[in-house]
């Protein structure tokens, strides 16, 4: 299986403005999401993703993100392997998002 496709922070910002059906999935732990998050994201921690996939609509696009992009790539790979077709992950994670899109966002 090919690695999941990445989406750059600026591309994601444009996508979120243009497509209200995008499901933004934060796969970090809850405490991390409380430090900094992209508005509108669902928090589905990577370790619990198998039990939480019912929260996702397989007919809508999904973008996963984490702190730097490692866990979100794993999450995207898991979703692709489990019947989700339109899945990408945020390159560089929320850290890159804070640098490139939302400089007011707390970095940790």
Image (tube, helix red, strand yellow):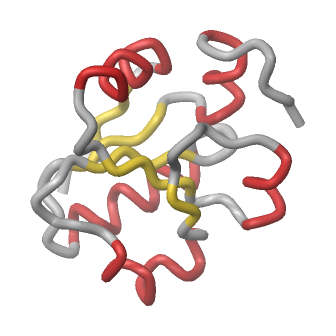
Q: Residue at 83% of width from left, 63% of height from top?
A: 31
Q: Quadrant of the N terminus?
A: bottom left
Of residue 16 and residue 68, the one placed in the foreground of this image is 16
Q: Is residue 82 above or below residue 59?
A: below
State whether residue 91 is above or below residue 53.
above
Q: Residue at horizontal 47%, vertical 77%?
A: 49
* x and y, in percent, of residue 17 in the image: 34, 22
Q: Residue at x 30, y 69 (%)?
A: 56
Residue 64's x, y, as percent? 44, 49
Compared with 101, 96 (above or below) is: below
Q: x, y (%) of residue 98?
A: 70, 21
Quadrant occupied by the C terminus:
top right
Q: Residue furthest bottom?
A: 51
Residue at the (68%, 42%) spot, across then down: 37
| Left or right: residue 19 compared with residue 8 | left
Q: Position of residue 85 (x, y in %)?
A: 12, 56
- Is 17 or 86 nearer to us in this picture? 17
* Residue 59 picture quarter: bottom left
Closest to the observer: 23 or 72? 23
């Amino acid at each position: 299986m090919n690695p999941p496709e990445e989406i750059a922070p600026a591309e994601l910002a444009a996508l979120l403005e243009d497509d209200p059906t995008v499901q933004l999935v934060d796969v970090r732990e809850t405490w991390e999401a409380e430090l900094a998050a992209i508005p509108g994201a669902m928090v589905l921690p990577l370790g619990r993703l198998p039990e939480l996939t019912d929260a996702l609509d397989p007919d809508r696009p999904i973008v996963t993100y984490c702190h730097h992009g490692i866990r979100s790539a794993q999450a995207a790979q898991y979703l692709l392997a489990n019947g989700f077709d339109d899945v990408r992950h945020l390159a560089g994670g929320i850290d890159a998002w804070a640098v490139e899109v939302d400089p007011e966002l707390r970095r940790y």
